[in-house]
Image (spheres, helix red, strand yellow):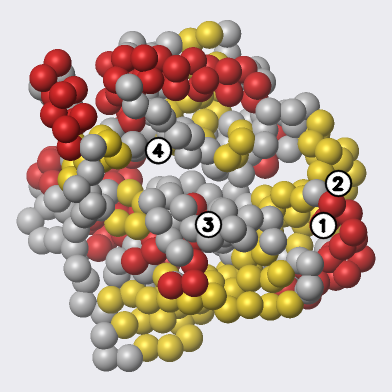
Amino acid sequence: MLLQNNISLKKYNSFGIDTIARDFYIFSSKDGLSEIVDTFQNQILDSHFILGGGSNILFTEQLLDTVVLKNEIKGIQLYKEDENYFYVKAAAGENWHQFVLHCINNGWAGVENLSLIPGTVGASPIQNIGAYGVEVKDLIESVEAFHIADKSWHQFTNADCSFDYRNSSFKNKWKNQFVITSVNFKFNKIPILKTSYGAIETELKKMGIEELNIRVISNAIINIRSSKLPDPNLIGNAGSFFKNPSIAKDQFEKILLKYPDLPGYPNKDGTIKIAAGWLIEKAGWKGYREGDAGCHSRQALVLINFGHATGSEIFALSEKIIDSIDKEFNITLEREVNIL
């Protein structure tokens, strides 16, 4: 357990926002977490925030008057296998992309489409991360978490988590109640390769790939993401800032009359999911800059910090974008990034 007071969180969030944390605790084991809660439970219950990789958060206050718990529990273990599946336990503090690469090196199939997503393993079920036709909910067997109020350990099944698009029980009804310490995954022994989403097939052709496997799909997605998304180590960002909205079919067809190039993906419930980045670009925000806050020049879905923007300035820009899309398309965008 490591305790620090009045520490800058600039290096702990991918936007690079220089917010000061009043109380900052790092734990690297389950016992360390229990010790922190035993010692500081009243302060933690009063107000706290669980910090993983800091890649899906926007700090909007200069002083974060709350207890920050930084999860750095590590470890990856193949704990069971049967005829069809590998069962793998990954600690919450593991870097997500490094975990994906570890899975690929071991032939554990299913997670390759989620390559190069920033963040940690522990954040993946909270957000139900997804990309290129795959959501992490389809791979999760169970989630282990610690209940702060009663100091008890819980094992949640996939069904318990109530996964939805970029959502889960940990993000709504259980918000701030649990600390996720590990996630159990179920991976196919026989890969089910998914290449039809986005530009995967085009990239595979460009790479000259003739025989598909999980590694080449991962490499293709890494190439695509690297070409479209800015590296947070070079320019502050949190990846996709907004969720892709779903609208009624008749509204989609109405917009299509004015914008024939509007991309749409049918959902099982009959609604149509459309690309938030396309909406933002059509509204003229791509490449926009206001001070040090702006929209990326290659992907309008990504808001960026050019160096010295505050969290409140980036938030204000997101408000303007939301208002603009609502006026132009009668669609209300929802932020994917957590605002604190």
> Label 2, on which residue?
23
Image quadrant assignment for residue 60: top right
Do tag 2 and tag 4 residues touch (Cβ < 8 Å)?
no
In this orientation, does residue 325 appear? yes
CA separation in Å, label 1 and label 4 = 30 Å
Which residue is under mark 1?
45
- Going from the N terminus, do you reach mark 3 or mark 2 first? 2
Q: Looking at the image, which residue is at 48% across and 86% down?
A: 79
Q: Quadrant of the C terminus?
A: top right
Is residue 93 visible in the rendered image? The answer is no
Whole-angstrom CA distance, mark 3 to mark 1, is 20 Å
Looking at numbered disc 1 in the image, what kind of residue is underneath it?
A: Leu
- Image check: 293 left or right of 129? right
Q: Position of residue 231 (x, y in %)?
A: 46, 34
Nearer mark to the viewer, of 3 and 1: 1
Q: Is 236 on the left-hand or right-hand side of 44?
A: left
Q: Position of residue 323 (x, y in %)?
A: 45, 17
**Residue kind at label 2, given as amino acid type:** Asp
Q: Position of residue 264 (x, y in %)?
A: 18, 36
Give the residue type at disc 4.
Answer: Lys
Mark toward the start of the polypeptide (2 vs 1)? 2
Quick one: label 4, few (<14), some, or many (20+) residues within 10 Å?
Answer: some
The CA distance from mark 2 to mark 1 is 13 Å
- The disc, 2 or 4, on the residue closer to the chain's N-terminal end is 2
Name the amino acid, label 3. Answer: Ile
Give the residue pinned by disc 3.
Answer: 126
Of the image marks 1 and 4, the number of the one nearer the N terminus: 1
Q: What residue is disc 4 on?
A: 243
In the rendered image, the vertical position of residue 225 relative to residue 280, given as above or below: below
Give me the residue at 60% from left, 49% from top.
53
